[in-house]
Amino acid sequence: MTEKTPKRENYFDYTREIDDLTGIEVLDTFEKFSQRDDVFCRALWDEEVSGEKVMAFYKGYYMPRAKARKSDGFSQRDYALRNAAWHVCNVLREQKDGRREGFHDHFTSHDDGWHEPYPFESAEQATVDIRKVAAFSGADLVGICAYDERWMYDGIYDTKGKSKPLDIPDDLPNVIVTGESMDKDLTATVPSALAGSATGMGYTNDCVTLLTMAQYIRNLGYRAYATMNDSALAVPLAVQAGLGEGGRHSLLITPEFGARLRLGKIFTDMPLVHDKPMSFGVKEFCDICNRCAKGCPPKAISFDAPSDHMYNRSNLKGVVKWSTDAEKCFKFWINQNTDCSICIRVCPYNRDYSKWYNRAWQKLAGGSFRKIALWLDDKLAHRARMKSADWWQKKNID
Ligand code: SF4
Ligand code: SF4
């Protein structure tokens, strides 16, 4: 069984043990992150980030306002697929009373569950079941960790720069973290509107998986709150749940998909066994690699060692890690009129791990021959942008 959840005010002490396992260094200056400072929320209230172009960018995710152009990857058919990939996610997020579920607020599209908890023989049995249900519901990855108050948002973005209290109970001891992979070939076409289809479909799949799993848990008689980008920081929870490690581009890198995935979280009191954080040499590899920093057009990724440096208010305070300049990154998205994931495309961990030679490469990258792995990636991997027109013509996507 899991440990008892500490009270909120004690969150700083009880997590030291997990920090030893993850290598996440939390300083005494640490402050919880307020969602209103997330750059996507600032775009709705902060003059430093917002503006007419930003509003046009958001509206462009609905077809009549998409600003298609002639360049490769930005035509009407490219936007048609990108916006269709986002469609189900958009339908689920637009709720009554100003709620934007999955982005600002947790999901509420649930039926009533069972009136009392299902009597599992053990937490181990419940964990076996939830892994099976996760795979059935479409999750490519699943991990479980303890509730950690530090990564919960210190207020949820409401409207016009205002926050409202987080409305997820603080006595749910477990967090299930899920990962949905993004299409590798589509990601190869970034920067393009077409590549945004991989992001949109990742989110849409995430919605389906999270709502199905949370409803299953509720049907068993336990509490479950499904969240996507809302409510809590996903990357530290995913690291604690053993899904992967944080990279220089500040994204989660997993052994199965590199950074090519979207994350979801379910907060629950279903009895579950926690996974252990894992290391497969990402930190050491990022120390000698800077492909993402070099490849980022607006230079939003640091070439330096991990630190608690804050570029602006969109960074987390008091945690030593690789951080990015979200203002520069977001401005680039606005200028090209779609999201970007060049840092995912150029990352050496972005590989098809169903191939034996890519699994062998990862082993090499995780050991003392990592410089050879980096050299091999330079020589053999095809990391140049794929033309979107080629993606449309490619017959057998492998
Ligand atoms: S998404 Fe694009 S702009 Fe943002 S950090 Fe990555 S490469 Fe840079
Ligand atoms: S591109 Fe290199 S430095 Fe950047 S996250 Fe990937 S492995 Fe790390």
Image (tube, rainbow, N blue to C red):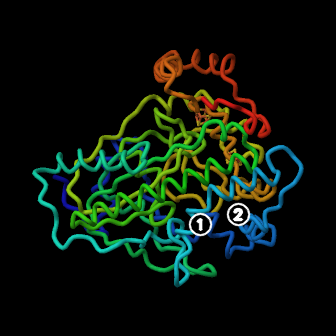
Q: Which of pointers 2 and 1 lies earlier in the amino acid sequence? A: 2
Q: Of residues 72 and 268, which is closer to you in this image?
A: 72
Residue 209 percent coordinates (x, y):
42, 55
Identify which residue is drawn at 68% across, 38% down.
293
> Three-letter amino acid code at disc 2?
Tyr
Secondary element type, mark 1: helix
Q: Nearer the viewer, residue 138 or 341?
A: 138
User: In the figure, residue 382 lies in which quadrant?
Assistant: top right
Q: Is residue 99 above or below residue 65?
A: below
The Cα atoms of the two marked residues, 2 and 1, are separated by 9 Å
| The residue positioned farthest toward the bottom in the image shown | 97
Q: Which mark is residue 90?
A: 1
Residue closest to the eye, 71 or 330: 71
The answer to whether mark 2 is within 8 Å of ligand 1 is no
Seen from this angle, which residue lies furthest right?
70
Quarter occupied by residue 381: top right
User: Where in the figure is residue 384, as x and y percent of width and height?
Assistant: 74, 30
Vertically, is 238 above or below 335?
A: above
Quarter the C terminus occupies: top right
Residue 372 horizontal side relative to residue 22, left or right? right
Circle 2 sits in a helix, a strand or a loop, which is it?
loop
In the picture of the structure, the residue carrying the numbered disc 2 is 61
Q: Where 389 sits versus 53, above or below?
A: above
State the image coordinates of residue 108 (x, y, percent, origin top left): 42, 73
